[in-house]
Image (cartoon, rainbow, N blue to C red):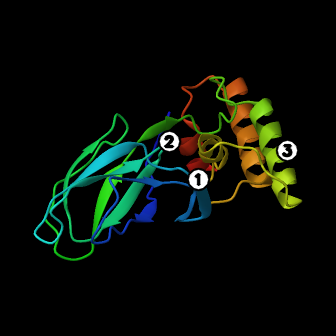
Amino acid sequence: MFPVGSTVIFDVSLNDTPPTEMDINDVDVDKSYYTIEGNRIYGRVKIDESYYHPNFCFVDFHSDTLCGDFTINDFCVVSANSDNITENSSVEMDKDHTLHAVWEKTVNLGDVNNDGQVDAVDASSVLAYYARISTNQNGEYTEEQKLAADVNDDGQINAVDASNILAYYTYVSTTKDDIVPIDEYLKKM
C-alpha cells in the first residue's frame, strides 16, 4: 500500500458581511504535475468572530479530498471538523493567512482497478487511459486511479507506466524471493 498526501490550494476570502455558509465547489487547482478538478475538501471550518467581523460563519469543504490549503482573511479559525482531515489548527489572523489541512488516502500503487492485484489488466487500463487523453477525450479515471496509475511518479500517465506495471507483474509472477512493493521494485530498475 502506498500512502498519498498531496497539497491542493484554495483561496477563500470572506468579506465584511460574510454569508452564513460558503461552499467551495468546482474549482481547478494545481497538484504539482496535473490538475485536480471539482470538489476537493470534505469538512467544515468554523470561522469565529473577530474584532472586525463580529459574526461567525462556516466555510464548507466537500467530497473526496486528498488534501488542501485554504486562505482565510481577517478571521479566527476555530476548528476543522471532518473524518478525513487529519491536521487542523487554530490561529488568530489580522491579515491573509494560509491554514493547512491534510487528508491522507491509501492507494495501492499500480492497482488501477483496485482489485488487490497489480497485473496485466491494470497495464491495459493505463494504455486505454493514455489513448483517450492523447486524443483529447476524457480519461475516465478517478483521482485515486490516477495516483495508482502513475507508478513512476512523474506526473504523467502513459505507456511508461503501463510497461512498468507489466514488468512488476512479471516479477511478482516469477520471483521466488520475498516480493517487494512496486515503488521499491521500480527504484531498482
1 or 2: tag closer to the N-terminus: 1
Q: Which amino acid is tagged 2? A: Ser
Q: Which mark is residue 63?
A: 2
Q: Kindly report which numbered mark, 3 or 2, lies closer to the viewer in this rendering.
A: 2
The residue that label 3 is drawn on is 128
Residues 104 and 17: in front is 17
Gap in angstroms between the C-alphas marked 1 and 2: 9 Å
Secondary structure of residue under mark 1: strand
Q: Which mark is residue 38?
A: 1
Residue occupying the point 33% across, 38% down: 82
Residue occupying the point 85% across, 61% down: 136
Q: Which amino acid is tagged 1? A: Gly
Residues 129 and 25: in front is 25
The furthest residue to the left: 51
Residue occupying the point 37% across, 60% down: 69
Q: Kindly report which numbered mark, 1 or 3, lies closer to the viewer in this rendering.
A: 1
Q: Which amino acid is tagged 3? A: Ala
Q: Is residue 19 visible?
A: yes
Gap in angstroms between the C-alphas marked 1 and 3: 23 Å
In contact (CB < 8 Å): disc 3 and disc 2: no
Task: Tell me if 90 is positioned left or right of 37 in this view.
Answer: left
Q: Position of residue 118 (x, y in %)?
A: 68, 31
3 or 2: tag closer to the N-terminus: 2
Secondary structure of residue under mark 2: loop
Q: Position of residue 57 (x, y in %)?
A: 27, 54
